[in-house]
């Protein structure tokens, strides 16, 4: 317990399980040969309305039922260059991609996971719109296994002297399809409404689920995800870059009633510790809210728990939010919660309130939010309005609580049913078993209930897939070296220091670095050393990307190759490389030649360079007389500013030092 009385994560008994989703670098989809490339346009458009299907034993999945209650129609956008009739669900799946199978078996071997001799494809119900079929194809490859995680430095919750390595168990490894890509209206000229692009749908993924482990120190979660990611990259069979690997994290606390909350969409490793901390305290707060609901003996009376209060606000001009809803002919519904006054504003931890939980729920139905009695009168809703609503609900403002929301008449009933159901679950269970989405700041927001066992049913269009002894032996031979050993090999091969080698291994640029640093056209010129290439890829691009208006996505691999090829030929100086990257990342230039031309980066000839430096020496004789050899630094700055990367810094410095020496001799 902390000095302020807030429990530590260790006090809460936080347990975490990771689910790592990694795209595989096969160059094609899992059940067809379409390449997963970004299309220039979407000439094919179609729409679907998805619904829940019963599982293998006849039940319906709660997550699918929740999504189906939204009754939404989804628009899909496609291009034949990156998708076919398989992704449109107009043609059965083709054979399983053998390269994806080989990669999955290699990963299972690396994690010492027990591989099955037969793979059976299942359909995993997904009706949020991200799959045209309403399901995701997945197959269990192996179960069990483990991996070692170097422990982070001692911090709060972990005593000094703990062992340096911790073993994390593997629960399962699956091979499955990736989902479609969300497109926003306006982002593409031919996308008229929010929908999904099919270029990513069907891309092979490996999902690795770990056994639950203690997360009293949330940095341990990051360390575990980093170790798994490094192993995956070590196979040289997975894709790299933003979006190619995603971490979902399952979080529970000791007093959470056994409920596990799944947080999806953690893109950055640095988010993990914040997500785990936030979610643990949110769950602890919900247990306190649950206890208060039970103490106040919340009375849910179906016959008088809700009332249509639209008429109260037809004459009200104070609340702009309410008036907008009235103009849209929405129904305004109030829901009473007997004997629960103060419950919606009660905040056992910062940013944890029942009112916030309900607001997150209704936003998933396209409703902007709710008003609740603990915050009213406010937002243009007067005390008289509140009194009239309470009268219609037969509620006491001293003892009861209520919420209000506006929605189309045909949707208001199902939404209020979901609200009442959620409050009941919190009162009964404490922590609902939800799926939530991670935000960039480490907070989480409600997505839908967690799926259950009814989610899966057999895929009838894919036959049983046999795994041979030869395939298992090959997978064992392909298993990657331990990360530390692989980094040492990188150091030795290219003569770079340990820090750069580690940065390269964890970056999206390892393969590109090896290609450039080994290229004969670059190395033969004798101008580009591997250390410079590594520094440009790991440091320069990262530093530029942190600046406002810079987008590393504009700088593709071919542009980087072209830049170093031109450098290797001696047509530009080393100093020009970062300038080219900056010009492209800022959208000032769309190609490498354009960047060179716009910034006048063409190398100057030897005679021209000597003339420029001689002129700088002549113009600054007074500085040289006063400072002597110390004038080299300021003059170097003047020269590099004038040359703008058109000459190697080393050669410029040699000419300046020589020029200063000649000038000093001439004044004696």
Image: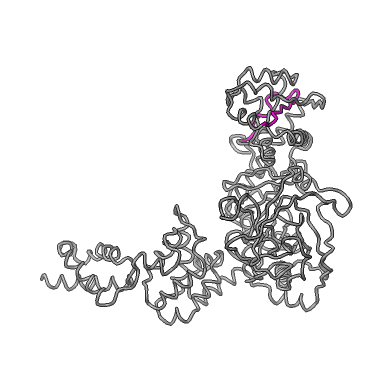
* On screen, residue 28 above or below 47: below
Residue 645: x, y in percent?
Answer: 34, 67
Q: Nearer the viewer, residue 49 or 438?
A: 49
**Left or right, residue 53 beside residue 201:** right
Q: Report the residue at 59% width, 36% height from top.
A: 3
| Quarter assignment of residue 444 | top right
Q: Nearer the viewer, residue 55 or 319?
A: 319
Residue 285: x, y in percent?
Answer: 67, 36
Quarter of the image containing the C terminus? bottom left
Q: Is residue 159 visible?
A: no
Quarter of the image containing the N terminus? top right
Residue lying furthest left in this view? 668
Residue 154: x, y in percent?
Answer: 58, 52
- Tally the numbered discs: 0
Report the span colored magenta. 329-349
| Quarter assignment of residue 566 | bottom left
Q: Nearer the viewer, residue 52 or 579?
A: 52
Q: Nearer the viewer, residue 421 or 313?
A: 313
Residue lying furthest right in this view? 57
**Left or right, residue 411 beside residue 196:** right
Q: Is residue 634 magenta?
A: no
Q: Is residue 342 magenta?
A: yes
Residue 457: x, y in percent?
Answer: 84, 57
Instruction: Examine the residues drawn in magenta and state their main secondary structure.
Output: loop
């Amino acid at each position: 317990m902390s000095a302020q009385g807030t429990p530590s994560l260790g006090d809460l008994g936080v347990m975490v399980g990771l689910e790592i989703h990694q795209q595989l670098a096969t160059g094609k989809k899992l059940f067809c040969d379409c390449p997963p490339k970004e299309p220039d346009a979407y000439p094919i458009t179609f729409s679907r309305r998805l619904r829940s299907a019963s599982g293998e034993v006849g039940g319906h999945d709660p997550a699918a039922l929740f999504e189906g209650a939204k009754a939404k129609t989804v628009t899909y956008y496609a291009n034949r260059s990156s998708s076919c009739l398989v992704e449109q669900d107009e043609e059965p799946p083709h054979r399983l991609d053998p390269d994806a199978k080989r990669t999955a078996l290699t990963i299972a071997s690396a994690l010492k996971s027990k591989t099955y001799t037969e793979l059976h494809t299942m359909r995993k119900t997904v009706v949020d719109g991200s799959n045209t079929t309403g399901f995701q194809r997945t197959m269990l490859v192996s179960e069990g296994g483990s991996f070692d995680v170097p422990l982070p430095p001692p911090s709060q919750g972990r005593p000094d002297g703990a062992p340096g390595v911790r073993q994390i168990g593997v629960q399962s490894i699956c091979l499955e399809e990736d989902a479609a890509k969300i497109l926003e209206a306006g982002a593409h000229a031919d996308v008229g409404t929010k929908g999904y692009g099919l270029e990513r749908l069907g891309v092979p993924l490996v999902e690795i689920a770990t056994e639950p482990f203690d997360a009293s120190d949330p940095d341990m979660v990051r360390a575990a995800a980093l170790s798994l990611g490094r192993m995956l990259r070590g196979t040289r069979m997975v894709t790299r870059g933003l979006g190619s690997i995603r971490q979902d994290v399952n979080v529970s606390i000791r007093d959470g009633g056994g409920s596990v909350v799944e947080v999806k969409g953690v893109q950055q490793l640095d988010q993990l510790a914040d997500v785990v901390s936030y979610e643990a305290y949110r769950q602890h707060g919900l247990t306190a809210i649950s206890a208060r609901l039970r103490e106040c003996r919340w009375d849910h009376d179906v016959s008088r728990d809700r009332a249509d209060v639209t008429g109260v606000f037809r004459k009200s001009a104070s609340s702009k939010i309410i008036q907008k809803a009235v103009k849209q002919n929405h129904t305004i519904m109030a829901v009473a919660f007997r004997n629960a006054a103060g419950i919606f504003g009660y905040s056992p931890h910062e940013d944890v309130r029942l009112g916030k939980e309900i607001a997150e729920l209704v936003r998933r139905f396209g409703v902007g939010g709710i008003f609740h009695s603990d915050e009213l009168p406010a937002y243009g809703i007067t005390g008289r309005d509140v009194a009239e609503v309470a009268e219609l609900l037969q509620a006491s403002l001293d003892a009861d609580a209520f919420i209000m929301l506006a929605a189309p008449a045909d949707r208001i009933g199902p939404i209020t049913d979901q609200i009442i159901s959620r409050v009941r679950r919190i009162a009964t269970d404490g922590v609902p078993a939800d799926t939530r989405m991670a935000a960039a700041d480490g907070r989480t927001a409600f997505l839908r209930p967690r799926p259950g066992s009814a989610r899966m049913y057999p895929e009838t269009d894919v036959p049983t897939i046999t795994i041979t002894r030869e395939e298992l032996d090959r997978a064992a031979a392909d298993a990657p070296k331990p990360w530390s050993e692989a980094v040492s090999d990188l150091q030795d091969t290219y003569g770079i220091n340990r820090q750069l080698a580690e940065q390269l291994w964890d970056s999206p640029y390892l393969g590109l670095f090896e290609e450039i640093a080994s290229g004969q056209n670059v190395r033969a010129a004798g101008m580009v050393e591997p250390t410079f290439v590594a520094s440009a890829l790991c440091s320069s691009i990262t530093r530029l990307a942190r600046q406002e208006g810079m987008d590393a996505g504009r700088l593709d691999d071919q542009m980087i190759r072209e830049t170093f090829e031109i450098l290797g030929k001696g047509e530009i100086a080393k100093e020009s490389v970062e300038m080219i990257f900056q010009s492209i990342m800022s959208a000032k230039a769309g190609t490498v030649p354009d960047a060179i031309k716009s910034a006048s980066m063409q190398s100057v000839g030897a005679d021209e360079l000597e003339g420029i430096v001689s002129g700088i020496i002549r113009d600054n004789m007074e500085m040289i007389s006063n400072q002597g050899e110390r004038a080299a630094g300021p003059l170097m700055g003047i020269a590099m500013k004038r040359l703008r990367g058109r000459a190697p810094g080393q050669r410029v410095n040699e000419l300046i030092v020589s020029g200063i020496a000649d000038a000093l001799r001439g004044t004696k």
